[in-house]
Amino acid sequence: MKVQGPSRQLMSEINVTPFVDVMLVLLIIFMVTAPMMMQGVDVDLPNVEAPAIPSEEERLVVTVDAQRKVYINEYAVDMDTLGPKLSAIYRNKGGKQGVFLRADASLPYGFVMEVMGTIRQAGIDQIGMVTESGERRDKAPGG
């Protein structure tokens, strides 16, 4: 009598279920973290055609919106207290802190220069102006 055992055939199909599971988990992670990538106060930045400058360190962001409200990162400050607060932050960081200035495009040039002067009086010489590239503005919804 001949005993039949389980057949030893090669499986020629790939099981895609684990692959789909991993892709769905990654999709969910990106969907949850994408809204967290947006930061700061929404302002209409001016257009430029220059390439972006890479940054090696975390810098403070001073934002001025269309209503002339001033923010350090996301915290609102009065124009009168901007200088002393930046000066205190600058001292705490060891005197090596730079600032990115995000100013709404509709603001008068003189007001932006006044904010820059206040930043310089606080002892900060490294000031970077944040702008949008022309390509990004053209692709923005409603713009």
Image (cartoon, rainbow, N blue to C red):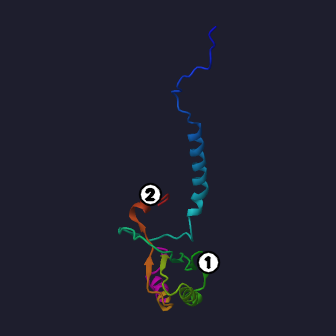
Contact (Cβ within 8 Å) of mark 1 with mark 2: no
Dominant SS type (magenta): helix
Residue at the image position 55 percent from the left and 86 percent from the top: 86
Tag count: 2
Say the numbered circle drawn on residue 66. Answer: none
Where is residue 58 drawn, in percent x and y?
51, 74
Image height check: is 42 above or below 20?
Answer: below
Residue at the image position 56 percent from the left and 68 percent from the top: 39
Quadrant where the N terminus sits is: top right
Q: CA distance from mark 1 to mark 2?
A: 29 Å
Say the numbered circle drawn on residue 139. Answer: 2
In the picture, residue 55 is in which quadrant? bottom left
Name the residue nearer the viewer: 95 or 126: 95
Residue at the image position 44 percent from the left and 57 percent from the top: 139
Where is residue 51 drawn, in percent x and y?
36, 67
Secondary element at image label 2: helix
Give the magenta part as a residue range.
103-117
Q: Earlier in the sequence, mark 1 or mark 2?
A: 1
> Residue type at mark 1?
Tyr
In the picture, residue 15 is in which quadrant? top right
Is residue 95 magenta-colored? no
Secondary element at image label 1: strand
> Residue type at mark 2?
Lys
Say the numbered circle drawn on residue 75. Answer: 1
Is residue 104 magenta-colored? yes
Residue at the image position 59 percent from the left and 89 percent from the top: 81
Task: Rate crowding at label 2 as few (under 14), some (14 to 19) or many (20 or more) other CA atoms within 10 Å.
Answer: few
Name the residue nearer the viewer: 130 or 37: 37
